[in-house]
C-alpha cells in the first residue's frame, strides 16, 4: 500500500512539474549578481539602472523581440558589445591595477571592511569578485611587463643586471633586475623574473605558475642555469655593462659562478663588448664588516651610536655615494681603535663591558679585524664604484682625490687616484672605439712635412670630451635636490657627448641591495602568480609584432 501511494505521489509531482512554464526568454536580457550586502539582484543589459525585481520591464523587452528583423538578429547575433567604459568600469580597472602593480593580495576585495569603505564612497559601486580581479590582474601585469620589456629590447645602449634575494610575505625570493637609462635620461629598474627560494627537500619546480629555486650547494647550479636562460631569452647579455650578485647569506656566494657562466655563454657575442664589470653591493660590504663586531652589547651600542650620526640608512642612501660611506665607516673604526689602543685603553675597555681584557687588546683586535676587512673592501671595490662618482659633475676626480688623501695620506693616495684615472680613461677609449671619436682632430690634408708636423702638434694639443669634462669647473648646486640625470640630459650630453654615453650606462649601476618599493611590488606580484603566462610568451609576441 505504501509503495502504491509513493508511486501515485511521484506521478502527480511529475505531472505538476510538466505544467510549470519554461524559463522565460526575458531573463536573457538581465544579468544576475550578488550585491555587497549579499542580496540577489539583476541588472538590465540595456540600461544602467539596477532592479531588485526585473519584471517591470518584461513587456518592453518582449516588444523589442517582436519588432521586424528580430528573428534575423536572433539567427545572426551581433558581436558582443565592448566592455563598459563608464565610471564604474574605470574604477574597477584602477582597483585591479593597484592590486596587480603594487603587490597587494587579491583577497582584499573580499574584506568586509574594504567593501564597506567602498560602499560609503559610492553606494552604487559593485566590487568585483576575487576571481574577476585575479583575471584582470593577470592581463594588466602581463601587459605592463610587455611594455617595459619592449622598451628594453629597443634600447641601444648598455644595461646593468643585478641578482639578489629579498624577503617577501611568501618567503625569501631570488630576483633578477635590469637597470638602464633611456634616451630621455629616465632610469628604469626592471624586474625580469623572480623565484621562491625553498630548501632542498621542498624543491619540486613550478607551482601554480610560480617557479622555485634551491640554493643548496648540491643543486645550486640549476639556479644559475635558470638565471642564464632568462638573461639569454631576454637578450640583455649582448649589451651588458656590469653585473651585481648579492644574496645576503655568508654561505651563498655565486658571484664568480654566475660570472663564469656569462663569460662562456654562447649568446654573449657582441664584438664590441669589453671586460665585464662585476662587483657586490656596497651596503652588503658594510654589513659583512659589521658581522665582525658581534661582541659585548655595550661595545656594539657605542659603535652604533657613531654610525647613526653618519646617516647610513639604506632607505635614505644617496645615489652613487656608497663608497663615501665606506670611508666614513673606516673613520669610525679608526677612531675607536685608537681609543682602544691608547693610554686610556683600560678605562675604555671597562666602559665598554670588557673588564677582563688586558690593556684593551681584545677590543683593539676586533677593531683591527674590521679595519683589515674595510681595507680589502676598498681595494676590491674602488675601481668600480669610483666610476659613477667621477661622472657626477659635482665631484669628478676632485672628490675622489680628497677621500683617498684623507684616508691614506697624500703619498699613498696617489696610487689609488692613478688607478681611478686609468680606469676612466680606458673606459672612455672603449666608448670612442665603439661610437666614433669625439676628439677635435685636425685632418691631415697636406704632404708638406712642416704642415704634417703642425697637424700632429695640434692633435697632441686637442682635448677630448673627457679632458674637458674633468678640467671644467665643478657644478655647484646649493639645493639638496640635484638631479644628476637631468643635468646630463640638458647640459652634459651637449658639452661632452661621448662622456654622456658613459654616464648613461654607468649611472644606472645598481648601488644598493635594497630593491625599490616598485621593484618589491613587482617581485611580490610575480610570486603571487599574477603573470600566469611566463614572460617568454610576451617575448615571442614582441618578436612577431
Image (cartoon, helix red, strand yellow):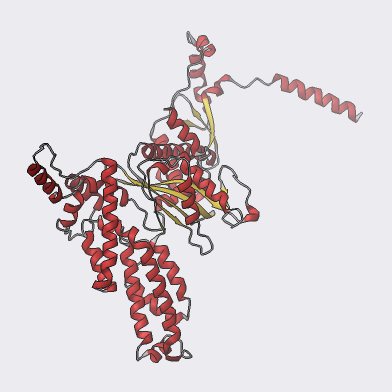
Residue 349: quarter of image? bottom left
In the displayed structure, 108 sits above or below 199; it is above
Q: Is residue 418 left or right of residue 188?
A: left
In the displayed structure, 339 sits above or below 172; it is below
In the displayed structure, 185 sits above or below 22; it is below
Residue 115 in view (yes/no):
no
Q: Position of residue 29 (x, y in %)?
A: 52, 23
Q: Is residue 18 left or right of residue 316?
A: right
Instruction: Return the residue nearer the eye: 4 or 194.
Output: 194
User: Which quadrant is home to the C terminus?
Assistant: top left
Q: Position of residue 354 (x, y in %)?
A: 46, 87
Name the residue furthest right.
1
Instruction: Return the residue nearer the eye: 9 or 206.
Output: 206
User: Which quadrant is home to the N terminus?
Assistant: top right
Q: Is residue 286 left or right of residue 202?
A: left
Residue 33: quarter of image? top right
Name the residue furthest front.
449
Point 23% across, 49% down: residue: 499
**Count of picture labels:** 0
Residue 2: quarter of image? top right
Point 34% across, 39% down: residue: 155
In the displayed structure, 418 sits above or below 351; it is above
Q: Position of residue 22 (x, y in %)?
A: 64, 20
Q: Is residue 504 left or right of residue 72?
A: left
Residue 195 in view (yes/no):
yes
Amino acid at each position: 500500500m505504501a509503495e502504491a501511494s509513493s508511486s501515485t505521489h511521484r506521478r502527480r509531482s511529475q505531472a505538476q512539474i510538466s505544467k510549470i512554464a519554461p524559463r522565460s526568454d526575458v531573463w536573457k536580457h538581465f544579468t544576475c549578481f550578488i550585491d555587497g550586502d549579499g542580496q540577489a539582484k539583476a541588472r538590465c543589459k540595456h540600461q544602467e539602472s539596477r532592479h531588485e525585481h526585473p519584471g517591470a520591464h518584461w513587456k518592453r523587452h518582449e516588444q523589442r523581440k517582436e519588432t521586424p528583423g528580430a528573428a534575423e538578429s536572433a539567427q545572426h547575433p551581433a558581436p558582443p558589445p565592448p566592455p563598459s567604459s563608464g565610471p564604474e568600469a574605470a574604477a574597477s580597472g584602477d582597483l585591479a591595477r593597484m592590486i596587480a602593480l603594487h603587490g597587494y593580495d587579491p583577497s582584499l576585495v573580499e574584506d568586509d571592511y574594504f567593501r564597506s569603505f567602498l560602499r560609503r564612497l559610492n553606494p552604487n559601486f559593485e566590487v568585483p569578485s576575487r576571481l574577476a580581479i585575479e583575471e584582470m590582474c593577470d592581463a594588466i601585469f602581463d601587459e605592463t611587463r610587455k611594455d617595459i620589456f619592449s622598451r628594453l629590447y629597443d634600447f641601444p645602449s648598455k644595461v646593468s643586471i643585478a641578482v639578489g634575494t629579498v624577503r617577501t610575505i611568501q618567503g625569501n625570493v631570488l630576483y633578477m633586475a635590469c637597470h638602464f637609462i633611456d634616451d630621455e635620461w629616465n632610469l628604469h629598474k626592471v624586474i625580469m623574473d623572480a623565484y621562491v627560494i625553498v630548501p632542498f627537500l621542498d624543491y619540486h619546480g613550478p607551482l601554480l605558475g610560480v617557479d622555485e629555486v634551491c640554493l643548496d650547494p648540491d643543486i645550486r647550479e640549476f639556479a644559475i642555469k635558470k638565471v642564464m636562460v632568462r638573461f639569454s631569452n631576454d637578450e640583455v647579455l649582448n649589451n651588458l655593462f656590469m653585473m651585481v650578485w648579492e644574496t645576503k647569506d655568508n654561505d651563498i656566494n655565486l658571484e664568480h659562478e654566475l660570472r663564469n657562466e656569462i663569460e662562456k655563454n654562447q649568446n654573449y657575442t657582441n664584438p664590441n663588448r669589453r671586460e665585464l664589470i662585476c662587483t657586490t653591493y656596497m651596503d652588503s660590504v658594510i654589513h659583512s664588516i659589521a658581522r665582525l663586531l658581534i661582541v659585548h652589547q655595550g661595545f656594539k651600542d657605542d659603535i652604533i651610536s657613531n654610525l647613526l650620526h653618519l646617516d647610513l640608512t639604506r632607505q635614505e642612501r644617496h645615489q652613487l655615494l656608497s663608497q663615501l660611506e665606506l670611508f666614513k665607516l673606516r673613520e669610525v673604526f679608526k677612531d675607536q681603535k685608537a681609543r682602544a689602543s691608547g693610554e686610556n685603553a683600560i678605562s675604555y675597555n671597562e666602559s665598554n663591558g670588557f673588564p677582563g681584557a688586558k690593556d684593551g687588546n681584545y677590543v683593539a683586535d676586533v677593531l683591527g679585524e674590521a679595519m683589515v676587512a674595510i681595507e680589502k673592501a676598498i681595494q676590491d671595490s674602488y675601481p668600480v664604484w669610483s666610476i659613477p662618482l667621477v661622472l657626477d659633475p659635482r665631484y669628478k676626480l676632485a672628490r675622489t682625490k680628497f677621500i683617498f688623501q684623507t684616508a691614506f695620506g697624500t703619498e699613498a693616495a696617489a696610487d689609488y687616484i692613478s688607478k681611478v684615472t686609468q680606469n676612466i680613461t680606458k673606459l672612455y677609449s672603449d666608448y670612442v672605439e665603439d661610437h666614433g671619436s669625439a676628439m677635435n682632430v685636425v685632418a691631415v690634408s697636406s704632404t708638406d712635412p712642416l704642415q704634417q708636423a703642425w697637424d700632429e702638434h695640434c692633435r697632441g694639443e686637442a682635448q677630448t670630451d673627457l679632458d674637458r669634462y674633468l678640467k671644467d669647473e665643478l657644478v655647484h648646486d646649493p639645493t639638496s635636490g640635484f638631479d644628476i640625470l637631468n643635468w646630463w640630459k640638458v647640459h652634459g650630453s651637449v658639452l661632452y657627448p661621448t662622456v654622456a654615453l658613459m654616464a648613461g650606462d654607468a649611472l644606472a649601476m645598481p648601488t644598493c641591495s635594497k630593491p625599490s618599493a616598485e621593484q618589491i611590488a613587482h617581485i611580490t606580484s610575480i610570486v603571487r602568480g599574477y603573470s600566469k603566462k611566463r614572460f617568454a610568451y610576451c617575448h615571442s609576441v614582441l618578436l612577431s609584432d
